[in-house]
Image (cartoon, helix red, strand yellow):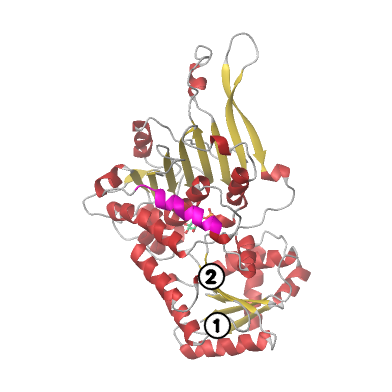
Amino acid sequence: MPHTIVIFGASGDLTSRKLVPALYNLMRAGSLPSGTQVVGFSRTPMSDDEWRASLRESTAKHAGDVPLDEASWQLFAATIHYQPGDIERSEDFGLLEARLAELEGTAGADRVYYLATAPQFYGPVVSALGAHDMAAQSRGARRIVVEKPFGTDLATAQSLNAHIHTVFRESQVFRIDHYLGKESVQNILALRFANTIFEPVWNRRYIDHVQITVAEEVPVGRRGSFYDRAGVLRDMFQNHILQLLMVTAMEAPVRFNANAVRNEKVKVLEAIRPLAPAEVVAAGVRGQYSGYLAEPGVRPGSRTPTFGAIRLEVDNWRWQGVPFYLRSGKAMSCRTTQIVIGFRQPPLELFSNGSRTAAREANRLVIQIQPAEGIQLHFHTKVPGAGMNIRLTDLEFSYSRHFKGRLPEAYEPLLLDVMAGDASLFARSDEVEKSWEIIDPFARAWSSDTMPAPDLYEPGDWGPMSSFEWMAAQGRTWFDLCPVLT
Ligand code: BG6
C-alpha cells in the first residue's frame, strides 16, 4: 500500500530543516517507498507551489546535497502538497480528510501523522483526528509520530499518553527520539549483541564506571524562550541521554523486535536506584554559562541550568556498584557525544616503575556518536627499548574510513521505520514515563529556591569547576578529549 505522510506544523523549523530534507534524501537514494506523498498542514496561507518553492530553498541548505539535484527535486516536489488549516478549527480537519481521500484515491494508503508542531498542540491534533475518525485503520494503517518534548514531567507525560490512547492504540504511536536514529547509537546494539568479545567484560566485574557525555559547542542562541523553561535536564537528559544509557546497559533481547528490545530497555530504567531528596542534591552538579542571561528570551536572573552532570546507579546483577555518570551542556569546548566505558585496573600493577602515570590510566572503550562516528579501545603497550615502559595506545574503528558514502541523517531510518510500522527505535509509553520518574527528582531539586544559583562556567569550558571537583571527590576524572575521532 502507498504511504501518505501528513505533517502538522508544516511551516515550522523541524519540517524544513529535518523532515523534508530526510524525505528528499530517502527518495534520492531510492529508499522511499514508491507512491509516497507528503501533505503539509499549517496555518500559513500557501499554495502547493509556494510550499514547494520554500522547501526547495531549505532542502538545498539542509539536505547536504550541494547543489540540489534539480531532476531529483522536481520528482520529489511533485509528491508534496499543502493544505492550509488551523489545528483549533474542527472544520479544517474535515477539509484535510477530504484532501487526503482525494489524493489517496479508492485504494487508500497507510498514513503517518507527524506532530511537528509546538507541544501544546499535540493534544488538540489528537482530539481532532479522533473526532474526524482519522485514526481508524479500515483504509490503511494510521500511525502517529510524536516529537519531543513528550511532557515536561511525569504527570504531564502520563496525561499526554492517556489522551493519545483515547484515539490511538499504543501500536500506532511512535514517540521519536532522533538519537536512536544515529548510526553509531544503533551500532552499540551491534557491537554488544553481534559479537561475543565484549559481552563477557560488559559488567561490574570488569567495568569501574560509565561516562555518557553530550557536549555542544553552540550556546542556546535564539531558542532562549523555550530553553529557559526546559533547561538541560528536560532538553537532553530525559530523552537522548537516558536512551544512550539504556542501549549501553540493557540485556540482550531474545529477538530483535520492538517489544523485546523495549522490554529490556525499560528494565534498565526500572533498575535505576530511586534517590531521596537529600541524595539527589549530592548526585549531581549544575552549571550555567556566562552570558546565558543575555540570550534573547531568557528570563532576567534565570537559574536554568545549561550544564548538568548526574550520577545514577543501576541496581541489577550486571551493574550493581558501577556508577553511570551522565553529562551534557551548551557552550562547551567542542561538539562531541561519547560513551566511555571505564574498565577496572588490573589487580596488580607490575610495571609501575616504568611509567607510573600512564600505567595508572585504566583501559577504556570510547564509543563516539558524533561528530565522527566510531570506536576507540585504549590499552597499554610496552614502549620499544630497554625497560618495561608502558604507554596508553589505541585501536580504532571509524565509520567513514570503513564505509564509503554518506551516513544517513538520524531522521531518515526513523521515517522509514514508521512507514514500515517498526517501533523498535521509538519510545514506548512506559519508557517515557519511567524516564520522567528518574529525571523529575533532579528537576525538582535543581529548581528549588533553597538551592544556590547554578555554578558559572565560561563558554568553551567543560562545564563549571565544581563538576571536576565532584568527580575527583569520587576518585574519578572526566574523559575530556574533544572528539577522539575526526
Ligand atoms: C535536541 C535539543 O533535542 O537535540 C537541542 O532540543 C540539541 O537542544 C539537539 O541541540 C542535539 O541534537 P544533535 O543531533 O545535534 O546532537
Write down the quadrant of residue 31 in the picture.
Answer: bottom right
> Pointer 2: residues within 10 angstroms few (<14), some, or many (20+)?
some
Magenta stretch: residue 265 in it?
A: yes
Which percent across, then down, holds residue 195? 64, 41
- The residue type indicated by label 1 comes to Ala
Q: Which mark is residue 136?
A: 1
Magenta stretch: residue 210 in it?
A: no
Find out whether the residues at labels 1 and 2 contact each other: C-beta distance under 8 Å.
no
Mark toward the start of the polypeptide (1 vs 2): 1
Q: Secondary structure at mark 2?
A: helix
Q: Which residues are magenta?
A: 260-273
Write down the quadrant of residue 106 in the picture.
Answer: bottom right
> Pointer 1: residues within 10 angstroms few (<14), some, or many (20+)?
some
Which percent across, then down, holds residue 198? 59, 37
Which residue position holds label 2?
A: 171
- For the residue pair 238 and 226, the one nearer the viewer reads as 238
- The residue type indicated by label 2 comes to Ser
Question: Is 229 situated left or right of 362 in this image?
Answer: left
Q: Is mark 2 within 8 Å of ligand 1?
A: no
**Quadrant in which the C terminus is drawn:** top right
Which percent across, then down, holds residue 476? 41, 32
Q: Which mark is residue 230?
A: none
Q: Residue furthest left?
A: 450
Which percent across, then down, holds residue 60? 67, 65
Q: Residue furthest front?
A: 254
Residue found 74% across the figure and 73% down from its top: 34
Please, what is the dominant secondary structure of the magenta stretch? Answer: helix
Q: Secondary structure at mark 1?
A: loop
Q: Is residue 307 visible?
A: yes
Image height check: is 290 above or below 416? above
Q: Is residue 372 visible?
A: no
